[in-house]
Image (tube, coloured by chain):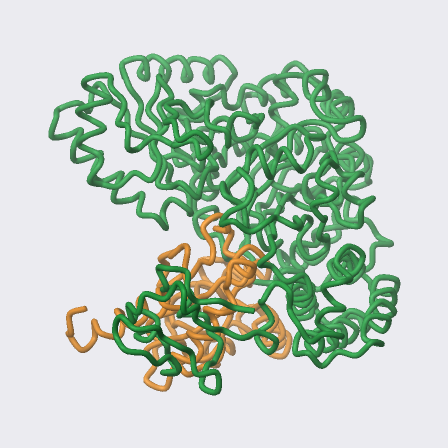
Amino acid sequence: MDFKAVDLVIDKHQEKRTALITILHEIQDKYNHLPEEALRKVASRLRMDLNDLYGVATFYKSFSLTAKGKHSVTLCLGTACHVRGGPRILKEVKKFLNIEPGQTTGDKRFSLNVVNCLGVCAIGPVMLVDGKFYGEMNPVKAKRIIEKLNKKRSGVRS
Amino acid sequence: MRKIKSVSDLEKWREAILGKEKGFEFTISVCGGTGCQAYGCQKVKAAFQKELKREGMKERVALKITGCPGFCERGPLVTIFPQNIFYQRVKAEDVPLIISETIQNGKVVEHLLFEDPMDHHKITFSQDIPFYRAQMRRLLSHNDLVNPTRIEDYLAVGGYRSLAKAFFQMRPIEVIEEIKASGLRGRGGAGYPTAKKWESCRKAPGETKYVICNCDEGDPGAFMDRSLLEGNPHSILEGMLIGAYAIGANQGFIYVRQEYPLAHKNAGIAIKQARKAGLLGKNILGSGFDFDVEMAKGGGAFVCGESTALIASIEGKVGEPRGKQIHTVTEGLWGKPTNLNNVETWANVPLIITEGSKWFSSIGTDKSKGTKIFSLVGKVKNTGLVEVPMGITLKEIIFHIGGGQQDGKQIKAVQTGGPSGGCIPASLFDLPVDFDSLTQVGSMMGSGGMIVMDEGTCMVDVAKYFIHFLQEESCGKCLPCREGLKRMGEILDRITEGKGSEESLSLLEELAEVVADTSLCGLGKTAPNPVLSALRYFRPEFEAHILQKRCPAAVCTPLIQYSISDLSCTGCGACKKVCPMRAIEGEKKQNHRILLELCSKCGSCKDVCKSDAVMVQ
């Protein structure tokens, strides 16, 4: 892996400790997760203890130390989505992808996440797939959306 | 873009913008909020662009992608000005008809109008729709007029006029006095008087001071701040500028949670435009006052909505709160005096400066002034953002604005205040909504989430949900919160699995008391509220789970069973097709039945059944 981009991100933020969260976000956007090598680089250039940096990187839920799948499936489990049946969707999606939230499928196709609220409560339950919001979900609809993504690869028309 | 160096520059620019706008006969506003985006408003926008170009009407008709008008459930929303015709659930296919009928022939397109659920008549104008009629839209009034990515749109509705007034007609101390006289209290949840905070920060020793806008709206079920920052970011900047002037701060931060990409983007654009126009930077409007704002992004931690944790997060540290013996107004960001307010609080500031404290304090109750935005969601017919005067009753919000129950199930409670609040039973819906009344009944105003619950919502499950939520979000710094919530969660898990005992409830109450009394920050102190309020008003539901091993709302999976009614089943086979466990048998056009030993209780059969034949008890 090429880590030149890490230097560029740190340069952009002038090695500022206060920009750490933003720096980590930008590195994650680039590499899909926070590779160890990148974290070592950040620690040395920001003159931080690597332990402290790992503390930050593991405290915030948005960061992942392992590579994510090609598609990201995020289910909202905020209160509004919860009372409208969010947990039932999660249960079925978990079973369907055969992974727990925070994990990635063996073929690196899908990562599953849950969040506490996406702030789109009025149309809940909400699912966010690759940055696109889907409202008024139920287990059947959710599975169809994921299935469609899966079929795209093999070229089967749905 | 112009560089503004004085108030007269600002007014000249405004005149030029208004002059240009006069050339348009119509304005079509398409909501570009996150909710409408989920419903495909981008396609509607593209269709309008194409159609206006095709008809050669770009000179006569302005097209705006605006912030959220609030009625998210009916999206994508389109409003036609100047008439204020309100179209809902608009699809790209409808666009040519809107252009040919409404714009060219002055007629309304009937099928896109909102239909009154009571008498089924069509309503043309937004102000006549029950959802909007009882609202008092002050903060949200510009959301459907302003394209958040254009500073010109904000100027056209009078933007940055308050700033000029504050800078040149008021001394900083007078600004604080005005806010004090208005009675504005912080909209983030606790309701602390805004002017008092500003005053303490102003008086705190030190040259360098900071102001922060808290948009880490973590309460699940609340999205007022997202819509404000996403839909009208310049109004927040203007509020911060006035606050910074009053306090004597030269640097501000807007902290946006990572889950709000559009709010982050729009606020960032607004900052860049304001800098370019000279409304941020050195010697703003020639006043000699310098101020700039930077963006900061969260990392998905709920606790970072707490002021000291948020500050730690901006400093690039783990978001752990600290003790409250040192106030952030004297020692906050990097140890400097820091004033932190919520998005909605900042949004109120320009309004108070323009309209005056008398106007502001004439709205609301004795101790809670002004309007408040709530996100009305959950099991209610009309969901979305509602702005109402303080003191309005819950009944008015839920039944008049919200339209009451959603699908035949009676409403039994409303949850306010997020994980720090509680559930208020329907018997108390005559309660006026203000900071103090909600606290009295064991909940709190919080930031403004209102999640309506009906007979299909299990209160034990909701209590369990909040405890697990908070357990996960607890930063782990202090033991009562870290361990206490875990044990409370375990007790609730057992109850919902039908394994609770009679002592469970007293143990739960005892633990709740300890957690509330001995935790360091607000997260732990208020964490037991959802459980305590549920026990206070819905104890029989807990007892049904424990004594009869029954979930009255039919939610807790281990205690429920699915079955198919022979009377209603049409034998269409839809349930059989979706059942992931192959637990449904039956021939086409014959009654189907569920094999209980195979059923995983996922409920997919119920979701797809068109004849309501799947029952759960």
Residue B87: quarter of image: top left
Residue reaching furthest front? B567
Residue B502, placed above or below residue B319: below
- Relative side of A139 to B411, left or right: left
Residue B276 coordinates in the image, percent (x, y) = 43, 33
**Quarter of the image with the C terminus of chain B in it:** bottom right
**Quarter of the image with the N terminus of chain B in it:** top left
- Relative side of B86 to B137, left or right: left
| Res B109 visible | yes
The residue drawn where x is 61% and y is 63% is: B553
The residue drawn where x is 50% and y is 29% is: B130
The residue drawn where x is 23% and y is 21% is: B103
| Res B317 visible | no
From the image, state the color of chain B: green
Q: How many marks?
A: 0
Q: Nearer the viewer, residue B175 or B526?
A: B526
Residue B176 coordinates in the image, percent (x, y) = 75, 26
- Relative side of B323 to B184, left or right: right
User: Any idea which chain is the orange one in this picture?
Assistant: A
Residue B430 coordinates in the image, percent (x, y) = 73, 36
Q: Nearer the viewer, residue B417 or B412?
A: B412
Q: Nearer the viewer, residue A155 or B251?
A: A155
Residue A38, placed above or below residue B392: below
Residue B560 coordinates in the image, percent (x, y) = 57, 74
